[in-house]
Image (spheres, rainbow, N blue to C red):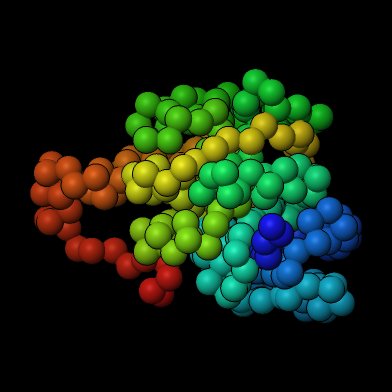
Amino acid sequence: MSRSVGIVVPAFRPDVDRLAGYVHDLRAELAPETIRIEVDDPSDATAAALADLPVTVNTTPYRRGKGAAITAGFEALDTEVLAFADADGSTPASELARVVDAVGESDLAVGSRRHPDATITSHQTFARRFLGDGFAWLARRLLDADLYDYQCGAKALTREAWDAVRIHLYEPGFAWDVELVAMAGALELDVCEVPITWEDMPKSTVSPVRTSVRLARALFVARHRAKQIRNSRVHNAIAATREDPTALVEK
């Protein structure tokens, strides 16, 4: 039975021509009910160009961060499957379709660049690969979900899984990916990893060193919250001494 699919594309200073081509490919490959672009702090020219695309565009006049943008987009969707992909098109539409197809047999499907069966057509710099591999190694040892890749910008989940995990998400930036996986694992949702073909897009707005430091910190925070979900006495005691944060869906 076919399921309705909604796709969110978070964007900050996107290459509009590349994004337009990617939207065309997504429509052709997945025939989604909705494609929603969540764009932060766009120039007037970018906003005008995006308005011409056959998608829903939501603009925010400041930078919310990737996680906050995806969360807002998912909250606006009413489809049975929710997916997101990075605006640079590094995950081809055909590969995102494979990730979406894995939903149903699993609650959350995670695209993977680091899986042994993945195909990388254009590699990251050595520094990015080294930092990414190190992060994945650490995450496997701290989280319930045992994956090769936690940060790939291609994931999909069921509406029911989103309803379960949404109140446990706090990270507004790039750490949102790992938090999503961590919370899904702690809630004992079925998480599967889908090896994909992936191409690095070198014009990233992300600093690898600065982002890696933030990700490492966020990983330990996500582990702490996951332990709370699992009712760890130690982590519940630690949480009791701190002010409760505000979930993204409540902001």
Residue at the far front: name it: 1
In-front residue for pair 211/59: 59
Asked if residue 95 can be seen in this view, the reply is yes
x and y, in percent, of residue 145 in the image: 43, 35
Above or below residue 128? Residue 44 is below
Which residue is at 13% across, 41% downward? 234
x and y, in percent, of residue 31 in the image: 81, 62
In-front residue for pair 50/36: 36
Q: Quadrant location of the N terminus?
A: bottom right
Asked if residue 12 can be seen in this view, the reply is no
Q: Quadrant of residue 130?
A: top right
x and y, in percent, of residue 34 in the image: 72, 70
Above or below residue 56? Residue 100 is above
Which residue is at 49% across, 41% downward? 191
Which residue is at 33% across, 67% downward? 246
Which residue is at 42% across, 46% downward? 189
x and y, in percent, of residue 2 in the image: 71, 59
Apparent side of residue 225 relative to residue 127 in the rendered image (left or right): left
In-front residue for pair 78/19: 78
Apparent side of residue 218 relative to residue 49 in the rendered image (left or right): left
